[in-house]
Image (cartoon, rainbow, N blue to C red):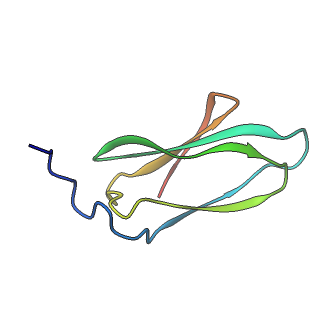
Amino acid sequence: MPLPKPPGAGAPAGKKFHFEVPQGGAEKDYSFVLVDAFGAREIWKGKLEPGSKHDFSLPGNASPSGARVRIFVNGILTEERPI
């Protein structure tokens, strides 16, 4: 028997997470992890250019209370932001 899905699972993404890459230096590996009532899940991973701006879609079932995004640079946690 399949496990029940969290509320809103499969719903279209409504919220966005905006991130501006700091200026200077070389291209780095970034990973963004959403942490909410449903646990931790990676929402994007890849290389980003210095000075670039990005909007990442959050899952439609992201729990709004206490949700945050952890930002990893080259595998190191550098920041955590509430959404």
* Depth check, front residue: 81 or 18: 18
* Depth check, front residue: 55 or 78: 55
Residue at left offset 37%, top offset 64%: 60
Residue at left offset 15%, top offset 51%: 4
User: In the drawing, does residue 9 fall left or right of residue 34?
Assistant: left
Residue at left offset 80%, top offset 57%: 52
Expressed as whole percent of the image width and height from the top left, the position of residue 81 reads: 53, 49
Expressed as whole percent of the image width and height from the top left, the position of residue 6 reads: 22, 54
Expressed as whole percent of the image width and height from the top left, the position of residue 49 reads: 83, 49
Residue situated furthest left in the rendering:
1
The part of the image, by quadrant, that contains residue 39 is: top left
Expressed as whole percent of the image width and height from the top left, the position of residue 41 reads: 43, 42
The part of the image, by quadrant, that contains residue 2 is: top left
User: In the drawing, does residue 34 fall left or right of residue 51?
Assistant: left
* Depth check, front residue: 72 or 82: 72
Residue situated furthest front in the rendering:
1
Quadrant of the image containing the N terminus = top left
User: In the drawing, does residue 31 fall left or right of residue 83?
Assistant: right
- Up-down relation of residue 64 to residue 27 (above or below): below
The part of the image, by quadrant, that contains residue 74 is: top right
- Up-down relation of residue 22 to residue 77 (above or below): below
